[in-house]
Image (tube, helix red, strand yellow):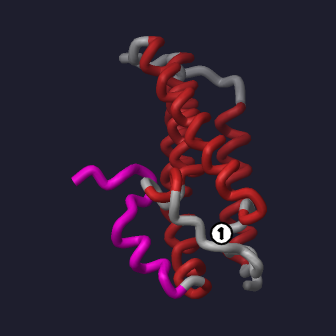
Amino acid sequence: MTKTWRDYFYVFLQALLFTAFLTPWHTPLPLAPPGWLAWSLMTLGLLVMLLAFLQLKSNLTPWPTPKKEGQLVTSGIFGAVRHPIYSGIFLATAGWASYQGNGYHLLWSVGLLTLFYFKSRYEEKRLQERFSDYRAYQKNTGRFFPNLF
């Protein structure tokens, strides 16, 4: 599949938000969670990302448009969530921001999740065009977090 201007737009915005998250500005959180909880969120996020990276292998791409030779992965961590890398990034950045007690970074973490929502909507349209069985997978699997109910 050919990339469109939206592919470049979403990846550019993602890079901007990552850059904003990494700035050293600090705004104290009025109510920070306990350190163990923040570290747990961060560790869970990193673990989810690692599992997704290992599972995607050659299918991995920063672009929302799937690779021409790519395969649809629906097992493992992808059997629980459709976009585990986005989930992992959010959990890791929110956990780090919470551990630092930094409201500024937490705000950018939520900004990343918001971007991932719109990026994943576009990505899923492209996946539906590429894979005929994507809609069935979509109905049974949560976007960022598992369907628990």
Quadrant of the rendering where the C terminus is positioned: bottom left
* x and y, in percent, of residue 67 in the image: 74, 75
Identify which amino acid the numbered label 1 is placed on: Pro
The residue nearer to you, when weighing 59 against 12, is: 59
Q: In the image, is 68 to the left or to the right of 87?
A: right
Q: Residue furthest top?
A: 35
Q: Where is residue 33, by image quadrant?
A: top left
Picture layout, residue 2 above or below residue 124: below
Left or right: 43 with respect to 69? Answer: left
Q: Residue at x 57, y 87 (%)?
A: 129
Q: Quadrant of the N terminus?
A: bottom right
Nearer to the camera, 57 or 17: 57
Residue 92 spot, x, y in % from top left: 57, 33
Residue range corresponding to the magenta coloring: 132-149
- Residue receiving disc 1: 64
Instruction: Please say if 145 is above or below 101.
Output: below
Residue neighbourhood size for the residue with mark 1, other residues' Cα within 10 Å, grouped as few (<14), some (14–19), many (≥20)? many
Say which residue appears at 52% left-offset and 19% top-offset. Answer: 39
